[in-house]
Amino acid sequence: MASTDIGRIYTGALRNTRALERQGLEQMERQLSGLERYPDYAAVLRRHVETTKGQIARLDTALEAIGESVSTLKETATSVAGTIGAAVHAVAQDETLKNLYAGYAYQYDRVAAYRSLAVIAERAGQADKVAGFRAAVDEETKAAEEIAALIEPVTKTYLDLTLGGSKADS
């Protein structure tokens, strides 16, 4: 009975993590179109888009290894939530800054999720997947650090553009 329970927990954690990575990917791709005035920020997002695609591929492999497929219903629901979140920020005066803050927080959410997923995978007898989840922890931590380093410079650019009468948001 316990192996069935941990199996369900592991499957759910994989599906949830994948769905949230897809949501994050969509949000980053949407944000990129409005960052021409923030080239360093755009470069960080472009790198992380590629990293996220690799993470999704790892999650797909882990799901396939246990005979599961991607839950399209869950992906659709989180995709809609991601679109709504981006739309809410889009009406804000400081859309660029709010997206930056949300991205920073999101990276640490992913760090926590992958750390947890590594423990769940190990307990579920999927020790061969743990290294990939630990690698994702490192990738997400690096992305969070890159975003943290952008907070002040992006804020300064935002202020310079806004106070100078230029368009600061997309």
Image (cartoon, rainbow, N blue to C red):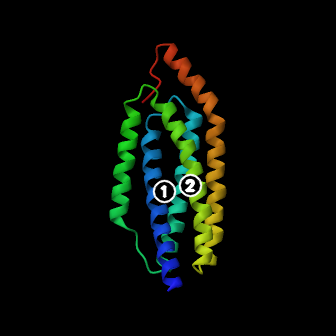
Q: Position of residue 65 (x, y in %)?
A: 51, 79
Q: Is residue 22 left or right of residue 48?
A: left
Above or below residue 128? Residue 51 is: above
Residue at the limit of the structure toward the top, as seen here: 164
Give percent across and percent down for residue 76.
33, 58
Rendering quarter of residue 45: top right
Disc number at residue 110?
A: 2
Secondary structure under tag 1 reads helix
Q: Is residue 3 above or below residue 55?
A: below
- Return the disc, 1 or 2, that comes first in the chain's sequence: 1
Q: State the residue at coordinates (37%, 67%).
A: 71
Q: Residues within 10 Å of mark 1 (few under 14, many from 20)?
A: many
Q: Is residue 46 left or right of residue 119?
A: left
Q: Residues within 10 Å of mark 2 (few under 14, many from 20)?
A: many
Which residue is at a point 54% across and 31% down the rendered structure image?
Answer: 38
Task: Name which residue lies at 45% across and 40% down.
Answer: 31
Amino acid type indicated by mark 2: Arg
Please provide percent x and percent y for residue 68: 43, 77
User: Which amino acid, mark 1?
Assistant: Glu
Tell us which disc is closer to us: 1 or 2.
2
| Residue 146: quarter of image | top right
In the rendered structure, find residue 30 and report the number of the disc placed on it. Answer: none
Looking at the image, the residue that sits furthest to the front is 1
162 over 56 or under it: above or below: above
Q: Do callouts 1 and 2 mark residues in contact (Cβ within 8 Å)?
A: yes
The residue closer to the viewer here, 132 or 20, is 20
Would residue 81 be found to the left or right of residue 100 on screen? left
**The C terminus appears in which quarter of the rendering?**
top left
Using the image, tell me which numbered label, if any, was put on residue 21: 1
Q: Position of residue 130 (x, y in %)?
A: 63, 71
Calculate the distance from the C-alpha at mark 1 to the C-alpha at mark 2.
Answer: 8 Å
